Amino acid sequence: MLDHEEVRRCLAAQPPRHLPQDGLRPAAVLLPLFVRDGEDWVLFTRRTEKLNHHSGEISFPGGAWHVEDAGPLDTALRETEEEMGIAALDVRVLGRLDDCISIHGYHVVPFVGTFPAPYPYRVNRNEVAEVIELPLARLCDPAVYHEEDWRHRGRIFPVGFFTIGSYQVWGLTAEILRRFLQRVYGV
């Protein structure tokens, strides 16, 4: 089981890389961790097919900044509560990771936090088609990760994939997860 103070120290040991927004839409996500039966798990959502961007994809709770948000952390916590019903007061923020840029023009700030489990999720079915909980130990297994080169707007980009059973976490979500695992586990 992860020592949450050790995770906090690992995340704080290397200041997160801040990228300029340069006209990109600000957004934030939460990489949510919880403990079940003495084992660490990660919460993901599968987005509904109705959404404009990343429909049907597995992602972390999060989304675009709103004018009432004081900053990226408020955005991540508000979106987590809107999508999953996890109250901001129930999330213990452990730190943040490097800023990311999505191919859809978002400047994404990822945070890492824990919440108590079991939790009485209140799932927003307009945004979330499926709640996915995956064991962190499985995500650390190098056998579940691979990269592919994808072409986008005339350039080649490496795209990461974590595959566990029928679940495939890829793209920006996989990149954020990979950065977390590197920072905390050196994987």
Image (cartoon, helix red, strand yellow):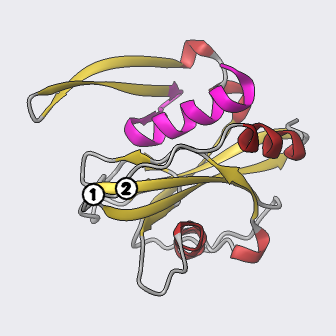
Image coords of residue 160 (percent x, y): 41, 26
User: What's the residue at 53%, 76% (across, down)?
Assistant: 82
Residue 173, magenta (yes or no): yes
Q: Name the residue under label 2.
A: 107
Taking 186 as reference, is 151 left or right? Answer: left
Residue that sits furthest to the left in the current view: 154
Of the 4 image quadrants, the one containing the N terminus is: top right
| Residue contact at pointers 2 and 1, CB within 8 angstroms | yes
Query: Dot 1, crowdedness within 10 Å: few (<14), some or many (≥20)?
Result: few
Quick one: label 2 or label 1, which is nearer the N terminus? 1
Name the amino acid type tagged 1: Asp
Magenta-drawn segment? 163-187
Spatial CA span between label 2 and label 1: 9 Å
Q: Residue at x 49, y 49 (%)?
A: 18
Looking at the picture, does residue 38 appear above or below residue 26? above
Residue 6, x across and y down, in percent? 86, 39
Q: Name the residue under label 1.
A: 22
Kind of element beneath mark 2: strand
Q: Where is residue 5 in the image (x, y as percent from the top left)?
A: 89, 46
**Which residue occupies the extreme top position in the image?**
143
Q: On the rendered structure, is 12 left or right of 84?
A: right
Q: What element carries label 1?
A: loop
